[in-house]
Image (cartoon, rainbow, N blue to C red):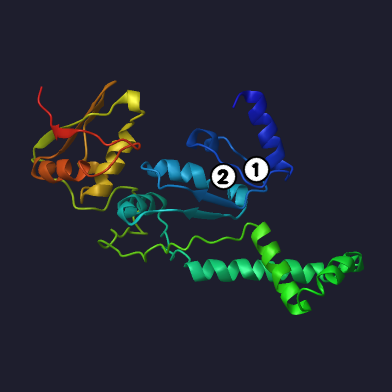
Amino acid sequence: MDQAQRDRVMSRLRDGTAELLVATDVAARGLDVDTLTHVVNYDVPSAPESYVHRIGRVGRAGREGVAITLAEPREQRLLANIERLTRQPITVEKVPSVADLRAAQLEQTVGAIRESLGADDLEEYYPVLHALRGEADPRTVALAVIRLYHEAAGNTVDETEIPDFAQRAERPRFDRDDRSGKDKGAPRNKNEKSAFIYISLGRAAGIRPGDLVGCIANETDLVGREIGPIKITEKFSVVGVPERSITKVIEALKHTTIKGKKPTVRPYTE
């Protein structure tokens, strides 16, 4: 969007004309809207600081808000990194089942019809009921009308159940009393050698250091401070990892994507 379009959108959001805004991380950093109540993260940001900026759009200046993050089981380490930075636990909730969704939607339909029962112009629609009287009894007509309204409101449910979350490994715990902000994971041996891996994605693919650190930490048991140094060129990246871990890091990255792209990964040689 150009600046004029952005201004119009923000004006609609502030005056309540728009109830939902989809924004990038860049846009989210600059939003300050008193009426925002929820932030929904479509993914878990690889950089914990990005998460803080995103959810900071609600709860500003003493206000309260709710942050909901959609996460895959393999993103547990990214959640743990955020917990360490914010000193706050993230509660993992179960995704609603198909039955849960259907029950909630039916309840919404009940509420809408209950409100309509109090309307003072219902008699205007009597000719419709009269026209259908010879084809079905009032109960069947009512059920057909409810079905029609329910579907018109968009209350359709995908029949595919999302599997229950099965925790692959216990998420690293953070120490609430630790104010240093440093990772409490196992320390890296100062005398341990680093090995370097080549990743076939660079600046042209939008790769940033946080993307590489987040991906490696998420797919392996390494923590952030064990990863680096990092060099990003236009076409590829080079990342340092503990020598003992290079094989498992390469194997892990071969089966994942970074910025939606599947990289070529191998030991780096000059």
User: Which amino acid is tagged 1?
Assistant: Val
> Label 1 vs label 2: CA separation?
7 Å
- Figure quadrant of residue 206: top left
Name which of mark 1 and mark 2 comes first in the sequence.
1
Circle 2 sits in a helix, a strand or a loop, which is it?
Answer: loop
Q: Nearer the viewer, residue 128 or 123?
A: 128
User: Which amino acid is tagged 2?
Assistant: Arg
Say which quadrant the N terminus sits in: top right
**Residue that appears at 56% across and 44% down:** 57
CA neighbours of label 2 inside 10 A, class few (<14), some (14 to 19), many (20+): many
**Residue that appears at 65% across and 43% down:** 33
In the figure, is residue 230 to the left or right of 14? left
Circle 1 sits in a helix, a strand or a loop, which is it?
Answer: loop
Give x and y (percent) for residue 198.
17, 30
Give x and y (percent) for residue 4.
67, 25
**Residue that appears at 36% across and 42% down:** 46
- Figure quadrant of residue 202: top left
Would residue 161 be seen by someone viewing this image from the given angle? yes
